[in-house]
Image: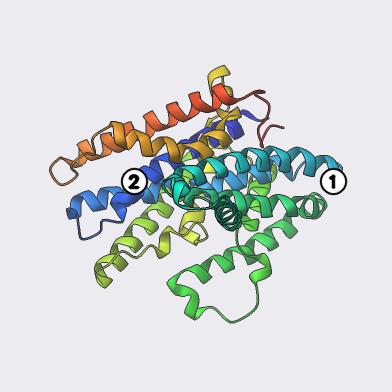
Amino acid sequence: MKNYISNLRNIATFAVIVLHVTAPFVLQFNKISFVSWQLVNLLDSILRFSVPVFVMISGAVLLDRNEPLNIFLNKRLKRIVLPFLFWSIIYFIFYYAGNFDKSSVLYLLQLLFDKLLTGTYYHLWYVYMILGIYLFIPIIRKWAQNSTKQELQYFLLLWVLTLFINTDIAKYVPSIEVLYFSKYLGYLVLGYYLDKYVETNSSKNTLYLMLFVFGVTLTLTSTSYLSITENKLNTTYYNYLSPNVCLTAIGVFLIGKSLLKTSNKILIDLDLHSYGIYLVHVLVLHYVYRLIPMFNINGNSPTYLLTSIIGVSLITYLISFFIIRLLAVNKKIHPFVT
């Protein structure tokens, strides 16, 4: 495992938590002060790289190796599905506990089955997405490994065109069917391409940073402009599958590849438990909010708001890590272990 991959996964995991802490305040457009909303809008725009980078990491790690189909499916899917099912049931109990004494066992089992089809809690959508990606990896890795650099660039170019479908520019895009190249599969190939073919060095760090800043600026200004113009929150450019978020993710990935080359036991341990941290953190956040009085975002400075968001996120991250660390029977039970 390359150190930068491990470090990027830790950063993306923490970014997701901060994003979930920030999201409720972003939804308060026109209900909180303009300055406070623009601050959380900026924070949300910065953190949009998290999910794309997760998928890019999978591409960098998994598309460049050779494994028999049965070994790949057994190793990866088991490491994802078993923890996912366990925490799905935990979230189901958490959400529906108040109905247990009013409902029959048969009804609850049917409800659990129905919820498992789409997710028992909001953040679990990612697991359904990544499972679909993983099912496709044994097929696409053969193509990726036998493709030239130019052929990979061709695929990525067509994929980038599909990202504009999720923006206001979509009405100007010809009705050519390119959906075969769309969605998160592109991030998988992009991660493989950046890891294999893009050589990073310190002299290019400014360029990588510019990509990140440009992507964040597009997200921030587009969301702000559309929301103000429509007088309601417009999250079109928060979409992970938008060109602005893609630029942000590329910038973060290349900065990480260039700079995050060293690691230590603590960072490695955090990485080994990152999937579990992702699964449990929403439940932990619920109780952190109950223990820590919610901050008055209209009555305090933007600095206080930012400090509070980071503080709550950090507490949630650490508690989540210790819970997963205690529950882990074997530290190597992790979907991304190579």
Evaluate whether residue 262 shows in this view: no
Asked if 337 appears above or below 54 in the picture, the reply is above
In the rendered image, the quadrant that contains the C terminus is: top right
Q: How far is mark 2 from mark 1, CA to CA?
A: 40 Å
Q: Nearer the viewer, residue 157 or 317?
A: 317
In the rendered image, the quadrant that contains the N terminus is: top right
Q: Secondary structure at mark 2?
A: helix
Residue found 69% across the figure and 63% down from its top: 154
Q: Position of residue 121 (x, y in %)?
A: 49, 50
Q: Nearer the viewer, residue 54 or 125?
A: 125
Q: How is the image coloured?
A: rainbow
Q: Position of residue 282 (x, y in %)?
A: 44, 41
Answer with mark 2 or mark 1, whichever residue precedes in sequence.
2
Other residues around mark 1 within 10 Å, as few (<14) / some (14–19) / many (≥20) = few
Q: Which mark is residue 69?
A: 1
Asked if 178 appears above or below 291 in the picture, the reply is below
Q: Position of residue 47 (x, y in %)?
A: 42, 46
Residue found 19% across the figure and 55% down from its top: 34
Q: Which mark is residue 244?
A: none
Residue assigned mark 2: 22
In the current view of this chain or complex, which residue is farthest to the left?
Answer: 299
Residue found 31% across the figure and 64% down from its top: 233
- Contact? badges 2 and 1 (CB < 8 Å): no
Left or right: 7 as drawn, with respect to 72: left
Q: Position of residue 211 (x, y in %)?
A: 46, 50
Residue found 61% across the figure and 42% down from its top: 84
